[in-house]
Image (cartoon, helix red, strand yellow):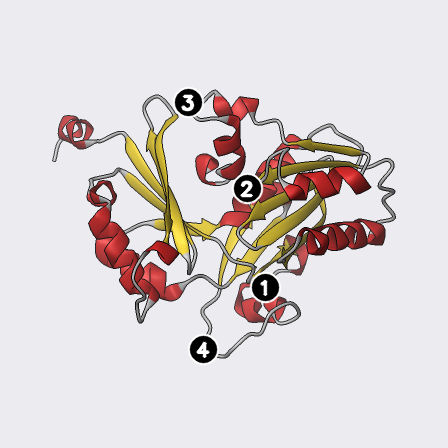
Amino acid sequence: MSVNANITDKKYKKLALQVTLNGFSFCIFDTLNQVVLSVKEIDFAAYPKAAKVEDYYWKAFTDNPELKDSYDEVIVLHDSNLDTFVPTALFDEDFLGSYLQYNTKVFETDFFAFDALSSYEMNHVYIPFVNINNYLLDQFTTFNYKHTNSILVSKLLDLSKNVDEKQVFVHFSDNKFEIVIVQNQKLLLFNSFDFVTKEDFIYYLLFTTEQLNLNPEHFKVNLLGGVSEESELYQIAYKYVRNISLLDVSDLQKHNDFSTAQNLKHFILFQS
């Protein structure tokens, strides 16, 4: 096939899916103009009960024909808390499971993967959703995949360049949140927490920051993900932490026409 034919066949469209066991989000990129064209969220709770998670994905793909369009690139982001970051100096690809055994239950049958964050001299080790990957392979033939927190942490480290004070970021999704503490492109702490109430959240935040001797009168917290100034999560953080704000996503908004709330919620997906 000639080069010209290849150019003609190119769609200049990319599909990104952020997958969980309870649903997924997806967005479509115009790669020629580097903008996000559309975004959609799928909640499996709205579907009839199915025996396997793959059945929910089959139904969602049936209901959303744009997922079956032709794309130049497909990327799948695995959104879970079965993950950990390992400095390159301590990393051995032959022992991926050993890095996870301290913060999650690991089985001999588990499949492990890692994303290299070479710019920051570390690797992100995690357990991908193998059953979801297998289903998506039937849909797309080929795709790349990585973990959501690989993007989250690397983007927050990018934002910390030349900022010498310790910065605290909290990213919210359904029933879990990540705390990321950075200082001038160095990752000081990462952890993920399941939570039910706003009191759970503030307890984990204050306890975690206390481990780094951070004073809530002084450190700054940026919130992102599924959160707003009106939410009870923001309100309780405002009560206990002096410097609290939503993350500034104005740079991200230059590449799409979506609201500030949507850019906060899909901070990871939009930068995949």
Q: Is residue 57 left or right of residue 106?
A: left
User: Residue 19, how many percent across, how many down?
Assistant: 41, 53
Q: Which of the marked residues, 1 or 3, is nearer the chain's N terminus?
A: 1
Disc 4 secondary structure class: loop
Q: Is residue 97 above or below residue 21?
A: below
Disc nearest the viewer among 1 and 2: 2
Q: Are marks 2 and 3 in contact (CB under 8 Å)?
A: no
Closest to the observer: 258 or 16? 258
Taking the spot 87% from the left edge, 37% from the top edge, the residue there is 217
Q: Quadrant of the N terminus?
A: top left
Disc nearest the viewer among 2 and 3: 2
Q: Which of the marked residues, 4 or 1, is nearer the chain's N terminus?
A: 1
Find residue 257 and name its label. Answer: 3
Report which quarter residue 2 is drawn in: top left
The answer for how far apart the CA atoms under marks 4 and 1 are is 19 Å
Q: Is residue 141 visible?
A: no
Disc 1 secondary structure class: loop
Find residue 226 and name its label. Answer: 2
**Residue at which label 1 appears:** 92
The answer for how far apart the CA atoms under marks 3 and 4 are is 44 Å
Q: Which of the marked residues, 1 or 2, is nearer the chain's N terminus?
A: 1
**Residue at which label 4 appears:** 109
Q: Are marks 3 and 4 in contact (CB under 8 Å)?
A: no
Q: Residues within 10 Å of mark 2 (few under 14, many from 20)?
A: some
Q: Residues within 10 Å of mark 4 (few under 14, many from 20)?
A: few
Q: Are marks 2 and 4 in contact (CB under 8 Å)?
A: no
Q: Which of the marked residues, 3 or 4, is nearer the chain's N terminus?
A: 4
The amino acid pointed to by label 2 is Gly
The answer for how far apart the CA atoms under marks 2 and 4 are is 33 Å
Closest to the observer: 247 or 72? 247
